[in-house]
Image: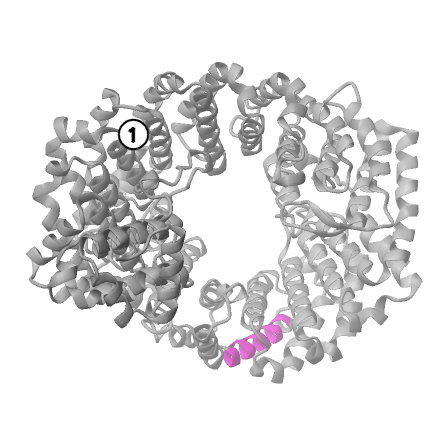
Amino acid sequence: MELSDANLQTLTEYLKKTLDPDPAIRRPAEKFLESVEGSQNYPLLLLTLLEKSQENVIKVCASVTFKNYIKRNWRIVEDEPNKICESDRIAIKANIVPLMLSSPEQIQKQLSDAISIIGREDFPQKWPDLLTEMVNRFQSGDFHVINGVLRTAHSLFKRYRHEFKSNELWTEIKLVLDAFALPLTNLFKATIELCSTHANDASALKVLFSSLILIAKLFYSLNFQDLPEFFEDNMETWMTNFHSLLTLDNKLLQTDDEEEAGLLELLKSQICDNAALYAQKYDEEFQPYLPRFVTAIWNLLVTTGQEVKYDLLVSNAIQFLASVCERPHYKHLFEDQNTLTSICEKVIVPNMEFRAADEEAFEDNSEEYIRRDLEGSDIDTRRRAACDLVRGLCKFFEGPVTGIFSGYVNSMLQEYAKNPSVNWKHKDAAIYLVTSLASKAQTQKLVITQANELVNLTEFFVNHIQPDLKSASVNEFPVLKADGIKYIMIFRNQVPKEQLLISIPLLINHLQAESIVVHTYAAHALERLFTMRGTNNTTLITSAEMAPFVEVLLTNLFKALTLPGSSENEYIMKAIMRSFSLLQESIIPYIPSVITQLTQKLLAVSKNPSKPHFNHYMFESICLSIRITCKANPDAVGSFEEALFMVFTEILQNDVQEFIPYVFQVMSLLLEMHKNEIPSSYMALFPHLLQPVLWERTGNIPPLVRLLQAYLERGANTIASAAADKIPGLLGVFQKLIASKANDHQGFYLLNSIIEHMPPESVDQYRKQIFILLFQRLQNSKTTKFIKSFLVFINLYCIKYGALALQEIFDSIQPKMFGMVLEKIIIPEIQKVSGQVEKKICAVGITKILTECPPMMDTEYTKLWTPLLQALIGLFELPEDDTIPDEEHFIDIEDTPGYQTAFSQLAFAGKKEHDPVGQMVNNPRIHLAQSLHKLSTACPGRVPSMLSTSLNAEALQYLQGYLQAASVTLL
């Protein structure tokens, strides 16, 4: 694309259309942009637009499109074409920093993100001058520019908070510190001075405090991995200023908004984080400063109000106390009973209260409430922090703390009992207190693994939780219902099984509650109970125990999906999946109605898939319906195809990218259920599956390969007779996959199925070409993964066509090639093969080469006979060789970048491992002994003499064992 006005105009029009709410206008525009994004100059046109366009909406749209384009395409992936040409890359890096710094804030943020994505790949090696260019801008004195630099530096360096330690990372951080630490410290001091100079200028303070927040965040990132020498030497400067900022209160920075945190709150929150980092990681160096931070943060907590805008600040301040109180050498700060009472009374109890804002979220923003409460993303809620502080204090003071709180819990419950409809929040706080007191250790999945011995959980459950869940109305006191259900979830390992069984019908009943939180929690609790393990690795709750509830459980789960706000509720769909899995054949009578509801839901969500987890569990549930029904009645597969194919066709025709990999997996499952021939409906689809465009998307490859394997297993003869013209297409797919290091194993899966199932005459003309392609790949890039797959393939070929055919095809490509393959690949590498079936294939194949290939006995190949036998005995007896050459360690197969729909494996569409050798050989060791016996009968004397001259003693001993086990001898 030329950098011309005409192209800028075209691009402007298409960008406008991508904002149109009408999908008929929006989708084609998105497709057009997708089709041109590979063209040279495309990114430069976007940058020109965001700089020069007169319309603000186009500038913003161009900046977002540019950032997403960079996100998808900047990384260069081995084996894949470079999606951005070199001249565009150079131009982008040359222009993006000044452009970002001169743009308005909304656009600055997008470009700043783009810089950090580019930096993630190119900095420091391919973009050495980025830091210098940024640091030089600190001198400008223009805080719009300075904040642009700080924002970019923050998005570039924040990954240091979660990267694993490595020399590469240390080198990069050292380089950043050398260039950045001193200028950042000077900027910090200068900004603080400016704050006093402009103490009465509200607009100046806003800009300066925005800078201070970013500086404090950068401090956290640069200090996270280790304490840098520079910051240790300058700790006085940083900590003294941090401390004075914590105690600062400027009326001009206070906001009237009760919801939104102001700059002062955000800055103090970050300083609490920074102090907690030092207290946890560098406590020795931080010790002189700790007492004054504890005092300042304590005062902050006691004087800060209950408004939502202070939530982050309060939770970070409490987290600071929590991290300090569980360190042994700060224990003395908390020992005094009065201190503990004061903390409980002034910090913990007030921050456990259920506020009006929480009630509002519970009712009107339930998705966010659930995410915070159930999924632990409530890291920065007051309640979560207070709970962590309780846990921290219990580490050294469990007895006194439990004593103090038991009093609170009792008085709260008494208040509730006086007037439940008015005082229900007291009971809510009591339940929360008991939960945080009782849970010493919990896992990510919200289940307690270690409980406080001083709290009687079952008694509390029976007296205070069950009555709420047994009350006549499921819609009364929804918050307390949600608390009760969550209590069951959290303490499911501590509450006895009989109490859980009493709870199940109560939970099923609460699936009908109007409150989204309550019916979601009920579904989630059921799903968690169904996954609990009993004895002998079975489920704790059995299908038989659930028998009385099957109908009402399924009815209420599917009804819950029709409740307002829950049409795509992932917790409900996961509970449906788990119920199917637990109940197994008990669900068969309900399948006709269930599958109708699932297909209607599938059709509805395929119009605009937006909930990946919901969609995944929906497909899992479909697979379970198919599996369970067809296990009992294999002929039922036809009725599933009837129900599903119409929706599947629509998904494929509309190219619903998120669903296509799932559709292929379900189709594989259905096709594998057929016992004989392939139905014509599948054959009609076959040619479409070979279209190159489908194979461009990484997420499609595993399910498509499996689907083609199912076609070959069930209908190789039909393909050979009715679709022989498609065989080159099939081999074209193999050729594409084999060329990629990431997907070559998938290419071998396909090739192995072709060799195993296709009639030999249908692939005769292609065989030699297949081997030539494999050798070319071996020469160009030989990886361990490729070698392992290659070994399995040649041995499978040998089993299918005979050892002589294998030797002949190798030697027809190049004389003596067979010997080279044995000597250079099979003998030295066979130990790398892993997997039971793979090892068996290789063992049977090598046995055939040893015993059914005349040239091995009387040509120059004979010298390889004993080493090959020795390698085979090694495959049987030695541990697997899982070493990987150094440079290969860094090829990350899974790490395919970009926004392509990744492949999500459906657990319940799982494919049984297929053994092509099957019953033909049960025990490969005995098979080897019998085959050697047969060979020695054909040429007496030869085999024992070859063994005695060159097989090592240990291998010979193992071989004697095989011969004895097979009751044969060598002649």
Image position, residue 136 (x, y; %) = 41, 77
Task: Looking at this view, name the residue that lies furthest to the bottom.
Answer: 233
Residue 508: quarter of image: top right
Task: Say left or right for 886 vs 708.
Answer: right
Q: Nearer the viewer, residue 876 or 828?
A: 876
* Residue 739 visible in the picture: no
Report crowding for label 1: few under 14, some 14 to 19, many 20 or more residues within 10 A (C-alpha).
some
* Residue 507 visible in the picture: yes
Image position, residue 301 (x, y; %) = 78, 58
Residue 95: quarter of image: bottom left
Which residue is located at x 27 percent, y 28 percent? 653
Q: Which residue is mark 1?
A: 652
- Confirm whether the magenta stretch covers residue 761: no
Q: Nearer the viewer, residue 15 or 911?
A: 911
Residue 764: quarter of image: top left
Q: Main secondary structure of the magenta part?
A: helix
Magenta region: 181-195
Image position, residue 363 (x, y; %) = 66, 31
Which residue is located at x 16 percent, y 35 percent? 759
